[in-house]
Image (cartoon, rainbow, N blue to C red):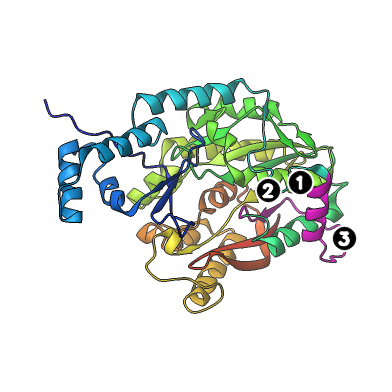
Amino acid sequence: MTQFLPRLRQSLDVFPSPDEEQPGLLLRDPFHYTEDILIIPPIFIGALNLLDGKHTESEVQAHLTQLIGRPFPIHPLHEFLAVLQQSGFLETTEFDQMRSQKHAAFAALPLREPSHAGGAYPADAFELRTTLDSYLMTIVPPNPQPILGIAAPHVSPEGGVQCYAAAYNRLRGLKEQLRGRTIVILGTSHYGEPDKFGLTRKGFQTPYGTIQTDTELVDWLLERAGDSINIEDYCHSVEHSIEFQAVFLRHVLGTNFKILPILCGSFLQSFLSGKPPENEDNNRRFFEALGEMAELHQDRLFWVLGIDLAHIGQRYGDHEEARADQGHLLEVRRQDLERLRLVGEGKRGEFLERVLPNYDELKWCGFTPIYTFMQAVPNARGNVMLYDQWNIDPASVVSFTAMEFAL
């Protein structure tokens, strides 16, 4: 019986090696099932493409032999495959055990622990306060005009400073209005199951202290839209799109509020079929439940969308290098702002027509939270306070916005 080599996990992050003395590809696990980070030497990069569950060891050895023009020894290949397997980068029983252990550990935790503190933002409360104060130092007169929500970036705070400042300074004049509210945070689920929504009952721990989750509303949604929900979704443990909003909210509003954290999975079936997301049963059921909740608890809720927009450049699969606000990124700006205009005017159908064709050439990772919000609060109208682009690396750009929403 032919024994095929196991598949390389498709969910790994893959980047060029940052170390000039160790060229190759860097592999890491965005789910943190394993903390190992591997640099794959150039000779073995060709072997990665054959780790698809359809090739044998002898076929991989033959391919490497062809690449170097002489017989490739079997022992280095054995060692390479063993390292991948032990690190949990292959779809094997080792990986299954790692995943099960991590999911069980997250489920058992009383709180959702901060996974990006000490990296994307300081883990020390004093240092964090100093840093965020510097980010939000823009002098903006307090605006007491009531709104029902904002959109802010979920890019690394240092990259989206101006839009974070515009969004969260808008809340400074609303501190009393938001006292005792539940803030519904709709975040992009970068790693979650398509056409599903990830919820948790856990409070969110921050360097400032814990933000309580409104478990009553979590259970309310679960009762009405259970099949569409992954409860205690492990993705919450590693996802930044909600974590960053929680930290900024705690910084600006203090302690007297709760959150309802909702991770929005991709609308895969909609892209495949070309039909609206609500044609899929899970999405429709959740939209209806969330819309009912929004109507019943209108005076209790405030909405925060943790969204980024376009992802352009070599990091995101494009051949051309991208420079913020230069060259073809000026056209990206125009298209982004046109989409945001439709969002602000509540024109769901026209907005969808801009996104679905060609699997969204702009790669808006904030599409699902935006569309979910438009379904839940169809009468909301929005205003773009600021739009910006940032080179996340020398060849790749992310765009984002700060918006305010009102009825």
Check residue 142 in the rendering and tell me which mark sits there, or answer none.
3
According to the image, label 1 marks what residue?
A: 249
Percent x, y of residue 100: 46, 23
Secondary structure found at label 3: loop
Q: Check disc 1 and report its element: helix, strand or loop.
A: helix
Please say if 251 is above or below 404.
Answer: above
Q: Nearer the viewer, residue 211 or 405?
A: 211
Residue 39's x, y, as percent?
42, 48
Magenta segment includes 397: no
* Magenta span: 126-155
* Rendered image quadrant of residue 185: top right
Residue occupying image coordinates x 43% and y 23%: 97
Of labels 2 and 1, earlier in sequence is 1
Residue type beneath disc 3? Pro
Q: Amino acid at mark 2?
A: Val
- The type of residue carrying mark 1 is Leu
Q: Secondary structure at mark 2?
A: strand
317 vs 89: above or below: below
**Can residue 56 be seen in the rendering of this structure?**
no
Residue at 68% across, 59% down: 158
Mark 2 and mark 3: Cα distance apart in space? 19 Å
The percent position of residue 82, horizontal first and vertical second, equals 33, 33
Residue 304, which numbered label? 2
Label 1 or label 3, whichever lies nearer to me, is 1
Asked if residue 17 lies left or right of residue 153, the reply is: left
